[in-house]
Amino acid sequence: MNMGGEWVSLFKSARFWMIILISVLSLSFIVWSINLSDKDDDSDSNNGGNGSGQEILWGVDSATYTTKEFYECVVDNFGKPDAWGRYIGSKKGVSSGLDQDEIDFLHEKDIPIIPIYNHFTDATGYDNGKNEAKKAIEIAKELGIKEGVYLFADIEPEYPVDSAFIQGWTDQLASSPYKSGIYGVFDEGSNLFKAFEAAASENDKVAKEVVVWTSYPQEGVTKKDNAPKFNPEAPKSANALIWQYGLDDETCNIDTNLLREKMLEGLW
């Protein structure tokens, strides 16, 4: 009997099956890794996703007063918002302002409010920024908006704007119960984009404390379940936590937004 030959044959056979086992385990690990990655991507892309693991929420804003019928239009056609942007103080021909009934209605629906201030058309000058902030603060207090909420200055594309206004707005809000927010079309090369960059480089409060709500780029209005991946454009120095990605829906007269979950701490 050739015992040496049998041992060689057995060794070769064992080695063969060991190679097969290692190959199977390696392939299984690769498949498991791919599936885990897909799950992470699905989690990040919930309501738009942001690739950071932080949940992205979906919301709307509107110049229209929120009645029961209007609310149902939004929910039935788009989904229930996680936040609702509304104007503080009415502006004739532009927007209907929040009142106590509307506030109570939205809060009863467990929908936090994003307060927007739009009572100006000139966003230049430090003193002007402070004065507009004072007006916004006064309205916010009259409405009973709680401490720590962001008030967003609505700087439209056609408004003249400079860094001084942004600094004045921010400094005044920093000395109030509220926090500074800036809304606008922050496309690179725009006057607002440049003004914010300048303000952030000149004033640490702008870079560290201001939340930017950018309306760029535009992807078009969608339902909550079909929102795009969270991809706002804003200066690198900006804390861009809200992205208005869709404008002027014809069905319910809303704009659609995505916002980072941590923004909820600064809503009302």
Image (tube, rainbow, N blue to C red):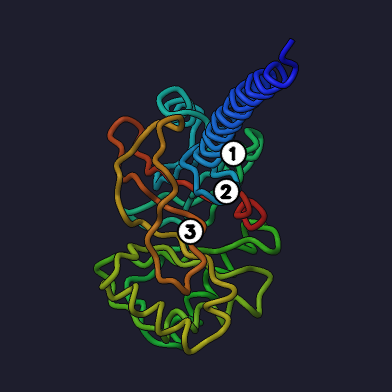
Q: Is residue 48 above or below residue 72?
A: below
Viewer-proximal residue among 203 and 31: 31
Which label was assigned to residue 68? none
Instruction: Residue under label 1, please give it.
Output: 106
Answer whether labels 1 and 3 touch (C-beta < 8 Å). no
What element does badge 2 sit on? strand
Earlier sequence position, callout 1 versus callout 3: 1
- Disc 1 marks a residue whose amino acid type is Leu
Residue 133: x and y, percent?
52, 75
Question: Residue 74 appears in which quarter of the rendering?
Answer: top left
Classify 10 Å Cα crowding around label 3: few (below 14), some (14-19), many (20 and above): many
Which residue: 45% across, 60% down? Answer: 213
Instruction: Residue under label 2, please give it.
Output: 113
- Disc 3 marks a residue whose amino acid type is Ile
What element does badge 1 sit on? helix
In the rendered view, does 1 fall on the left or right side of 87?
right
- Disc 2 marks a residue whose amino acid type is Ile
Q: CA distance from mark 3 to mark 2?
A: 9 Å
Instruction: Residue under label 3, please give it.
Output: 116
